[in-house]
Image (cartoon, rainbow, N blue to C red):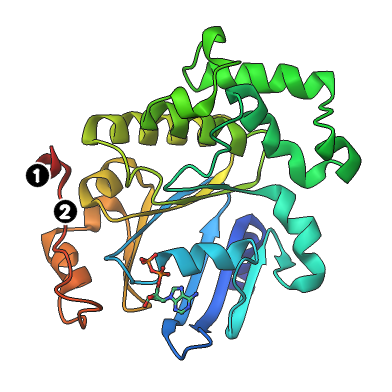
């Protein structure tokens, strides 16, 4: 490698927040969820993982915070290898947003957002729900930033709409100022209009907090609209990696073409306009 190339690759390695190298993941029952996936995600990028159900998107996300461990290859988060001994360091820097929101529905909005601090609180404080004052202030600011009002602070999450619950999920995710946000089908349970609002909010919050986002979606329109980069998976392999502009209709068909049905026929690519 010449000096210029070496300098270039050293620079890109420094600015890569996530590095997946030759990843394979085989579950205990023999399911091969990922095969030979290599990916570098630069800091600050909004990277959408696109693919049909069962393509391996969630598995790839879970490898970042160690909820799953690769059976082959390595994952690095900001230069730190994901492995048992590093999880306590990595997890507070990686937030997760879930399809089903994963909130404590009987608890208040404020409490749910404060729960974003739990990975860093001593157990006695967590059990006693003793959150420091600056944390309460931050929770209030985040609740306002995601478009909820003061009247929502003490309201139980169960009383909110799905879109409002995901706003709480986003506020909770940013409590620890994460370097990485993993969003696992964050709008799959929402109607098309709310989906757009939530994606807009996720993108603006991640830009404001300079977070790197890895977001799985199955809606092609949303991926095209919100991603800096689209990585499409099919049967555990990367079949497209490029800009939304380069993701044409042929690429969309390729995500679904030739893949074996898991259980019954696979859904064809769903456009937001169709779902409306
Ligand atoms: P996606 O998020 O794209 O829907 P997943 O990553 O959830 O895909 O799943 C990829 C493949 O791995 C699928 O075949 C799925 O059934 C399988 N899988 C996911 N989790 C497990 C598990 N815990 N045990 C066995 N197989 C699993």
Q: Position of residue 174 (x, y in %)?
A: 62, 35
- Using the image, tell me which numbered label, if any, was put on residue 59: none
Q: For ligand 1, give the image quadrant.
A: bottom left
Total marks in image? 2
For the point 58% across and 79% down, the residue is 70
Identified at 80% across, 31% down, the residue is 129
Instruction: Decide if residue 81 is on the left or right side of residue 8.
Output: right
User: x, y (%) of residue 6?
Assistant: 63, 72
Tell me the quadrant of the picture where the N terminus can be found.
bottom right
* Farthest residue, direction left: 274
| Image quarter of residue 111 | top right
- Classed neighbour count for the residue bearing mark 2: other residues with Cα under 10 Å, few (<14), some (14–19), many (≥20): few
- Mark linked to residue 274: 1
Q: Residue at x 56, y 72 (%)?
A: 20
How far across and how far down the image is residue 224, in percent?
26, 47
Q: What secondary structure is marked by label 1? A: helix
Q: What residue do we see at 32% from left, 43% from top?
A: 189
Task: Say whether residue 9 is left or right of residue 90.
Answer: left
Between 117 and 252, the one lying in front of the other is 117
Tell me the element at label 2.
Answer: loop
Q: Which residue is mark 2?
A: 270
* Apparent side of residue 204 relative to residue 112 in the rendered image (left or right): left
Residue 18 image-quadrant placement? bottom right
Asked whether mark 1 lies closer than 8 Å to ligand 1, one says no
**Marks 1 and 2: CB-CB under 8 Å?**
yes
On-image quarter of the C terminus: top left
């Amino acid at each position: 490698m010449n000096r210029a190339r070496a300098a270039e690759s050293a620079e890109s390695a420094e600015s890569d927040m996530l590095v997946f190298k030759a990843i394979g993941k085989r579950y205990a029952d023999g399911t091969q969820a990922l095969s030979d996936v290599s990916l570098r995600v630069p800091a600050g990028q909004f990277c959408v993982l696109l693919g049909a159900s069962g393509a391996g998107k969630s598995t790839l996300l879970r490898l970042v915070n160690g909820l799953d461990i690769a059976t082959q290859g390595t994952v690095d988060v900001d230069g730190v290898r994901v492995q048992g001994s590093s999880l306590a360091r990595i997890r507070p820097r990686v937030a997760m947003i879930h399809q089903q929101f994963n909130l404590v529905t009987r608890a208040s909005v404020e409490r749910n957002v404060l729960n974003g601090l739990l990975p860093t609180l001593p157990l006695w404080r967590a059990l006693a729900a003793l959150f420091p004052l600056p944390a309460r202030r931050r929770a209030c600011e985040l609740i306002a930033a995601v478009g909820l009002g003061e009247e929502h602070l003490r309201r139980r999450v169960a009383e909110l709409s799905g879109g409002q619950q995901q706003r709480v999920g986003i506020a909770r995710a940013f409590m620890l100022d994460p370097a990485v946000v993993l969003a696992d089908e964050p709008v799959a349970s929402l109607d098309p209009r709310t989906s757009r609002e939530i994606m807009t909010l996720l993108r603006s919050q991640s830009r404001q907090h300079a977070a790197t986002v890895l977001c799985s979606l199955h809606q092609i329109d949303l991926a095209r609209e919100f991603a800096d980069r689209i990585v499409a998976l099919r049967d555990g392999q990367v079949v497209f990696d490029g800009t939304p502009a380069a993701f044409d209709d042929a690429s969309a068909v390729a995500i679904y073409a030739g893949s074996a049905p898991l259980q019954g026929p696979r859904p064809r690519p769903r456009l937001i306009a169709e779902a409306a």
